[in-house]
Amino acid sequence: MKKILTTFILAAFAFTANATEVGQPAPQFTLPTLKTDSPTPLKQFAGKVIYLDFWASWCAPCKTSFPLLNKLHQKLKAQGFEVVAINLDEDKTLGEKFLQEVPVDFTVLRDAKGEWADQYVVESMPTSFIIDKNGIVQKIHHGFVSDDIKELEAKITELLAKK
């Protein structure tokens, strides 16, 4: 029993040691866009404040967040703000159908195997990472209710103001 417990604790430590955390550089990736499958690297947005959002078509809070994030993106894009949403549906058509119902003009990528969701340690839907102009994670946000947008906008605006 002691050996099992020790193994479990070591495995848990190893898992959290690799978790993306505030203050760490955001792991870099290249993923295809949902619409055209064009490879898009995260580094394409270097020098901008990024709201990196992991989502799925079945996620009810995502239906609330997407229109609000789209408005925020439109409002702050000229100041260097980008929303990059990563769909985790295995079936591409589910993400496409979601976007027909909730259209957005920000970048939507695809991680059908969940490899990058694992790298970022996404445990709930949606999970988002606010990344500063230097590529450092400044905030991790789990879930979404409409009032969250005020706090998120305040953090994003603060980061946009930094040189």
Image (cartoon, rainbow, N blue to C red):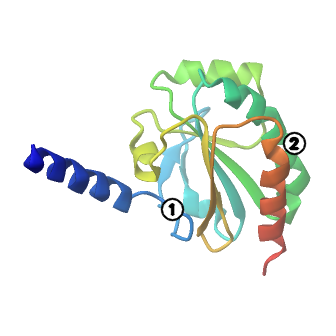
Q: Is residue 64 above or below residue 32?
A: above
Q: Which residue is mark 1?
A: 21
Secondary structure under tag 2 reads helix
Residue at position x 10%, y 49% from top? 2
**Percent x, y for residue 152?**
78, 53
Front residue of 7 and 21 = 7
Residue at position x 61%, y 61% from top? 44
Q: Amino acid at mark 2?
A: Lys
Residue at position x 64%, y 38% from top? 143
Circle nearer the N terminus (2, 1): 1
- Disc 2 versus disc 1: nearer the observer: 1
Q: Which residue is mark 2?
A: 71
In the visual, does 119 lie left or right of 32? left
Q: Quadrant of the C terminus?
A: bottom right
| Picture quadrant of residue 50 | bottom right
Q: Is residue 132 above or below residue 145?
A: below
**Percent x, y for residue 21?**
51, 62
Front residue of 150 and 46 = 150
Q: Quadrant of the N terminus?
A: top left
In the visual, does 95 lie left or right of 30? right
**Percent x, y for residue 15?**
32, 53
Q: Amino acid at mark 1?
A: Glu
Secondary structure under tag 1 reads loop
Single out the residue that lies furthest toward the front. 2
In the visual, does 18 lie left or right of 117? left
